Image (cartoon, grey):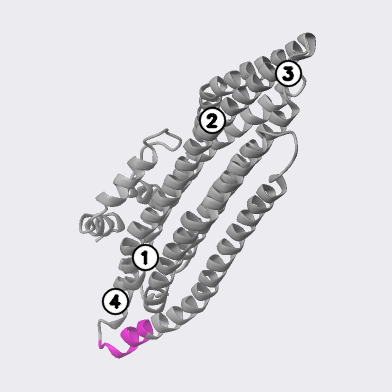
């Protein structure tokens, strides 16, 4: 029996509809990677063909970024128009020496700017939160498929320890992120917008402190969970290698007549299992990258619009509002950093699982 036949039989016996549906969900808002499946990735690995076409990926990223920029220009135009009105009201108040009406108009326009920014930020916040949730669901769907393959290859210690360890890390990380870190970033944005209603800085330093603390907490969480998992993966990989080599030696030397043939046959089957595990792991990496890149491009496009708008309105409008838009842009970038760090942690988890048994623990 050849490698292709063994792999096809193993793939037929596995239920991967849930994972493929997650790939469709990840790419529902845009397409960066071409439509693929675990079977196609495994065939590419077997035949030594490239899995990705990097030119197409770069072109897709550029097209999606420009599309998001065009979609966010409307927000920038609205903000510029409102700031022009604010500038006109201030000039009229200077000309006619009537501050009451103009100040009231400035406050109303400032509230309009705050409302537009808050609505836009809430949309970005929802996109980031949804992406992190889907990443967590993806990992929880991948582990029950990959870990049994890892155990089949002889990774008893790795499968028995890493599965609950990674599941626990994902649950705790998602809870901390959704209930503490991201709400803190949202609160800092509210403080920045409220501070824009006055020319004095009342809560700006508090908003910047909360935002900086959120990024630090995010980095600490990713480092902690990833570090523990990496150390545990290294330790269990060594234990699995020793167990597997002992088992192979026993089959080869203590089974009469057919011992060597049986050991070689098992080597072939476990090598095929390794290919399947790595193929599914790479498919998971594609899903995580899709869940990262598409929202990240949208978030960075909106952040760029905020930054450019702040530059444009500074000479024609209210400097306080210009500073506010610049800080809102920085807060949006903070969400992008949080999303990136979260995706990196999930990718580290997948890299650990793919790396274990990369050359077959049995050998």
Check if mark 4's residue and mark 1's residue have beta carbons within 8 Å. Answer: no
- Badge 2 local density, few (<14 within 10 Å), some, or many (20+)? few
SS assignment at label 2: helix
The tag on residue 271 is 1
208 sits left or right of 120 in the view: right
Which dot, 2 or 4, sits closer to the camera? 2
32 sits left or right of 114 in the view: left
Sooner in the amino-acid sequence: mark 4 or mark 1: 4
- Badge 4 local density, few (<14 within 10 Å), some, or many (20+)? few
Which quadrant holds residue 25?
A: top left
Sooner in the amino-acid sequence: mark 1 or mark 2: 2
Q: CA distance from mark 2 to mark 4?
A: 73 Å
* Residue drawn at 30 percent across, 90 percent down: 254
Residue denoted by label 3: 99
SS assignment at label 1: helix
Q: CA distance from mark 3 to mark 1?
A: 80 Å
The stretch in magenta equals: 247-256
Which dot, 2 or 3, sits closer to the camera? 3
SS assignment at label 3: helix
Q: Which x, y percent locates residue 338?
A: 56, 50
The tag on residue 261 is 4
Farthest bottom residue?
254
Asked if residue 35 is positioned above or below residue 14 in the image, the reply reads above
Residue denoted by label 2: 115
Sooner in the amino-acid sequence: mark 3 or mark 1: 3
Sooner in the amino-acid sequence: mark 3 or mark 4: 3
Which dot, 4 or 1, sits closer to the camera? 1
SS assignment at label 4: helix
* Residue drawn at 35 percent across, 44 percent down: 23
Confirm whether the magenta stretch covers residue 275.
Answer: no
Which dot, 1 or 2, sits closer to the camera? 2
């Amino acid at each position: 029996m050849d490698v292709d036949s063994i792999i096809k039989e193993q793939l037929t016996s596995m239920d991967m509809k849930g994972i493929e549906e997650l790939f469709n969900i990840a790419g529902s808002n845009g397409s960066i990677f071409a439509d693929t499946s675990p079977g196609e990735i495994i065939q590419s690995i077997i035949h030594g063909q490239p899995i990705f076409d990097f030119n197409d990926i770069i072109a897709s990223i550029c097209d999606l970024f420009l599309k998001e920029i065009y979609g966010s220009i409307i927000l920038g135009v609205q903000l510029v128009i409102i700031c022009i009105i604010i500038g006109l009201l201030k000039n009229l108040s200077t000309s006619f020496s009537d501050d009451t009406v103009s100040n009231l108009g400035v406050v109303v326009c400032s509230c309009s700017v705050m409302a537009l920014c808050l609505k836009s930020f809430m949309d970005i916040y929802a996109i980031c939160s949804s992406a992190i949730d889907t990443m967590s669901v993806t990992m929880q769907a991948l582990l029950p498929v990959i870990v049994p393959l890892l155990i089949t290859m002889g990774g008893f210690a790795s499968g028995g320890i890493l599965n609950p360890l990674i599941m626990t890390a994902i649950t705790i990380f998602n809870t901390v992120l959704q209930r503490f870190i991201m709400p803190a970033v949202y609160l800092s944005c509210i403080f920045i917008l409220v501070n824009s209603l006055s020319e004095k800085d009342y809560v700006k330093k508090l908003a910047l402190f909360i935002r900086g603390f959120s990024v630090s907490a995010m980095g600490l969480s990713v480092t902690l969970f990833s570090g523990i998992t990496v150390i545990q993966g290294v330790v269990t990989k060594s234990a699995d290698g020793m167990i597997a080599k002992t088992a192979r030696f026993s089959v080869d030397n203590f089974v009469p007549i057919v011992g060597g043939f049986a050991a070689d046959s098992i080597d072939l089957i476990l090598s095929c299992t390794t290919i399947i595990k790595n193929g599914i792991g790479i498919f998971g990496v594609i899903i995580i990258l899709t869940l990262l890149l598409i929202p990240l491009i949208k978030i960075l496009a909106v952040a760029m619009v905020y930054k450019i708008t702040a530059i444009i309105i500074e000479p024609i409008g209210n400097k306080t509002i210009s500073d506010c838009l610049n800080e809102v842009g920085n807060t949006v970038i903070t969400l992008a950093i949080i999303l990136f760090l979260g995706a990196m942690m999930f990718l580290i988890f997948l890299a650990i699982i793919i790396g274990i048994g990369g050359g077959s623990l049995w050998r």
